[in-house]
Amino acid sequence: MKVLAAVLLSSFMLLAQAAEVAGVKFTEQIDGPGDAKLVLNGAGLRKRLFFEVYAMGLYLPVRKHKAGEILTLPGPKRIAIRMLRDVSAEAFTEALIDGLRRNQSEAEMVRFAPRIKQLTDIMAELKEAKEGMAIDMDWAQGSGLRLVVDGKPVGAPIVGEDFYRALLSVWLGANPVQDDLKAALLGAKS
């Protein structure tokens, strides 16, 4: 009986930790890059003016609630973006680059330029981030940053955990694209 109660409580806790954002469900735990078990750290909504652009979940090996800890946390990670409207590949990557500029020095932007171009080229091949599209940005040591669209890897992996951390800073840095999205990804309860 105690075992059954523990299993039911554990199942309830997992369901309670899952999140739904603008109709998009983010599960509590996923099999991440390299078959790593990742947990949902937080999920939120990216808005631009009054438009809902995408729902986003952040998956980590362990929950962390401070941006600095997440930005330096080693191991696999996933940025899970679920598009809520059509956005051109150019607009999508311009927004990422703007977020990088807001959180990186000029020298870092120069250093990241070849990897930014690689990411931009991958997105350009897609032409558009369409409503309903699932875009995952996975990090795994030895594999690099892997862009996965609707469950299929696209483009070559982008090397360097420093670049993945820079991408995370778009949402979690000192100058995030949206303060309430940052709070949601850090696991703040609304």
Image (cartoon, helix red, strand yellow):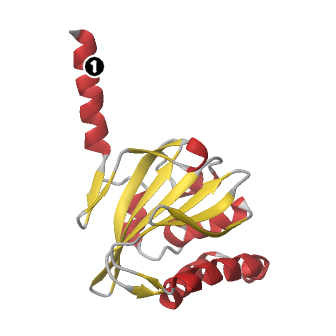
- Residue drawn at x 25%, y 26% as measured from the top left: 9
The residue lying toward the viewer, choosing from 92 and 69, is 92
Q: Position of residue 130 (x, y in %)?
A: 39, 80
Disc 1 packing (10 Å; few <14; some 14–19; many ≥20)? few
The residue lying toward the viewer, choosing from 33 and 73, is 33
> Callout 1, which amino acid?
Ala
Q: Is residue 168 left or right of residue 183?
A: right
> Quarter of the image containing the N terminus?
top left
Q: Position of residue 23 (x, y in %)?
A: 23, 64
Q: Is residue 116 above or below residue 29?
A: below
- Residue drawn at x 62%, y 83% as measured from the top left: 120
Q: Position of residue 30 (x, y in %)?
A: 44, 46
Residue furthest to the top in view is 1
- Residue drawn at x 36%, y 85% as measured from the top left: 86
Q: Is residue 98 left or right of residue 128?
A: right
Q: Which residue is mark 1?
A: 6
> Quarter of the image containing the C terminus?
bottom left
- Residue drawn at x 35%, y 64% as measured from the top left: 44
